[in-house]
Image (cartoon, rainbow, N blue to C red):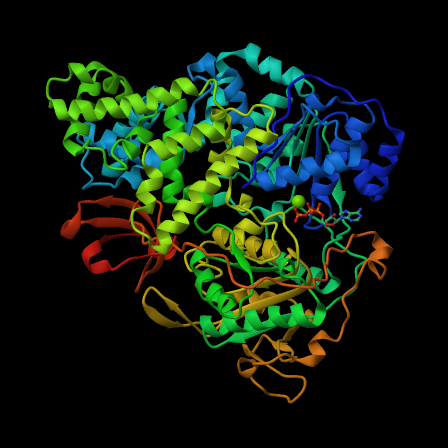
Amino acid sequence: MRQIPIQREEPTSIDPDPEAEKRILDGLNERQREAVKATDGPVMIIAGPGSGKTRTLTHRIAYLLATGKAKPHEIIALTFTNKAAREMQERVQKLVGDQTKGMWVGTFHSSFARVLRIDGEKIGYSRDFSIYDTDDSKRIIKQQMNRLNVSTDDVSPRGIQNLISDAKNRMVSPEKYASVARGRAQDAAAKIYPAYEKALRKANAMDFDDLLLRPLELFDEHPDVLEKYQTRWKYVHIDEYQDTNHAQYMLARNLADAHDNLCVVGDDAQSIYAFRGADITNILSFEKDFPDATTVRLEQNYRSTGRILALADSIIKENDDQLDKELWTENDDGEYIALMESLSEKDEAKKIERRIRDLHVREGLSHGDFAVLYRTNAQSRPIEEALRKENVPYQVIGGTPFYQRKEIKDALAYLRLIVNPNDTANIQRVINYPTRGIGRKTQERLQNFANKHGFTLWQAIERVEDIDTLSTRAKNAVESFRFLIAKYASKAESMPADELAQEIIREAGLLSELRKDHTRENLMRWENVQDLVSGIADFVASSDDPSLSVFLQEIALMTSQDEEDDADQVTLMTLHASKGLEYPVVFVAGLEEGLFPLEMAAKEKQDLEEERRLFYVGATRAEEYLFLSWARSRYRYGDRETKTRSRFLDEINSDVVRTAGGGELDQKKNRFKSSSDGGSDSSNYDGVDPHYYRRNLRDGSGSGASNGKERKLKRIEQSSGGGRRVVYDEGQGEIVPGVRVEHSKFGEGKVQDVEGRGEKATAVVYFGSDIGNKKLKLKYARLRIIG
Ligand SMILES: Nc1ncnc2c1ncn2[C@@H]1O[C@H](COP(=O)(O)OP(=O)(O)OP(=O)(O)O)[C@@H](O)[C@H]1O
Ligand SMILES: [Mg+2]
């Protein structure tokens, strides 16, 4: 478990350090240097993958510090994941030494959570506010649906949640939403939206959307607060700018308004989050928004071999809409890109595992050098199985993260309650877990009492004596729960957070609950809870502000990339999660029509282009070896489907691709020629081709020296066996507006609206412009959820 380093706020300054300055600039090429030295006014670095955008941004920050142009507290850098933030922070420290205290490097969400911690009181949030994840919000929505008699017949809580989040992201207020809502689902959402917002406020809680929207509200209502931050941050930096949404754009603009020193880096060709509200026009119109902007284009790629780049280029040039960019490299041509064809997903997994094992043994690549990328989470399972079978260590990014595990959420709920007792969602989670005689009826009566008098649930609990509808036994049970929470809440001031956690978890009965029966699962859960406590202890030891509330807010913002990943293991993740990362060996699996691109996405040009950008992102993660894999059949939703290979494979530059058996890729005939025997089908390929690995990997003294790229291939001596346990969630999900589904006749579609329930439920589904909207009876339509 890791924490985000917290920096003290006092302004410190570093004396100009000419040696550091030289070091910083020496590590860059001419163009990159130009970008680093352009310290006045808005700057956009727009360039292809692996051209050193992130590196340039990092060096720019170091340069500002080393030259004394900025003090650490005058710099803020916003990244897409906490992991990226951590790396950036570490690299800056490496370049300029330890004096970076006061500098802010973090994700948008964690940075603005911090702003709210400092100034949220001005808009009615205390600094101990809770951050609700989707689970917590859904609980609140359910509760409000109950209270307001909104039937779940028309739309599920999750459907309403999607609609509300959508509205919030478009900055549509509850009032405005009510006036534009159409159809039953939206009408229901319009009813719940204001109640949901009120309940969150009352609980002193924010959902993820709020973390970006509330700061805008704060800045809007309190210009003095905005001015404080504007004045403070002389330099604002944003990585992966192509994936910012409207709220993030507004925040960036606001912050940079005083000094006008906004530096953004990005690549429009790598924009892959439009489906989540990212707005590519932010990057496309930067020069219009900031007319005196300096634009720097980086063209030299340091990451990948020539062949990988040639392949990447051939992928992206199929797209129409993009800014002009060049990319070249001094790196070797490298290996051919290998096309792997398999009979089934199981066969595919086995081949991938063999390749990994072979490169590991023959080339001495370490397990951490491999990444397997895929389009949908469900694809990880067969690959996991193959790796586990052969004792290849691996990790799945985006499986059930540590902090989402039930036992951890239960323990955290107690901790969150101590910090913020008005946090209703958490009370509901643990008021009767472990069981303590506060049944559903009692909980309902408490809630009714709260509703009637305008109290929070906690306030009702505090007045349990006055609730006539409760029996004495129920009152006593509630009272001892109240006592438990109140006791630790008052201890929180004086007691170290880890001890506090240890004690309440024990006293609440969580540990004994998990030891009740001695199943392996429970033992594992018990250990997880112990891990949590030691994580808190680490946090207390390393943080400048070791309070429980800061710990809780930070872990609420951990993203799937932030899980422990330092061990030497193969990484499995979705293509989306791979953004910004690089690996010596990359597999892109499941390159089949209907899967990648997803069938639904293939219907609309815009969606198809986003899928293609995703392929581009995936391919450009590779440094040395790239494998493109597809299977002739795949088991999906209970059926074995015959697959054809992805159109993407027919678009790529075949000159740089060989089949795994060594043959050339024959795109026209949609089959392969083999250079060796003129006709062998690569699906029979089952072993390791000795010619394939004839090339020795470059090391630091080889061609790497010519371009200065630090090769990261690590030779390893030893590997530990066994995959990490992964909790795999098939996630059947529900048919709700916004969900992608598949219909046997109409293909892939997107649910627009759902009405009725059970036998009578119908859904309106949009199947692309050819077919349009269809109203389907769910009972007969047998829709499959695909995302
Ligand atoms: N001038 C340079 N000298 C040596 N290595 C470099 C140089 N510039 C970049 N690199 C290396 O090239 C690799 C890619 O750089 P970086 O990750 O910054 O690229 P990027 O443009 O941010 O890529 P992406 O678009 O995928 O995020 C890194 O390993 C980086 O250290
Ligand atoms: Mg980058």
In this picture, residue 340 sits left or right of residue 445: right
> Which of the 4 image quarters holds residue 82?
top right
In this picture, residue 670 sits left or right of residue 710: left
- In this orientation, does residue 170 appear? no
View extreme (top): residue: 224
View extreme (bottom): residue: 677
In this picture, residue 539 sits left or right of residue 146: right
- In this orientation, does residue 360 appear? yes
Quarter of the picture holding the N terminus: top right
> Toward the viewer: 436 or 163?
436
> Which of the 4 image quarters holds residue 162?
top left
Ligand 2 in which quarter: top right
In this picture, residue 106 sits left or right of residue 41: left
* Residue 91, placed above or below residue 469: below
* Residue 251, placed above or below residue 702: above
* Residue 641, placed above or below residue 219: below
> Toward the viewer: 645 or 707?
707
Count the marks: how many? 0
* Residue 307, placed above or below residue 480: below
- Percent from the top left, x then y, of residue 104? 64, 27
> Toward the viewer: 284 or 740?
740
- Percent from the top left, x then y, of residue 478? 22, 24
- Percent from the top left, x then y, of residue 683? 53, 80
- Percent from the top left, x then y, of residue 473? 14, 26
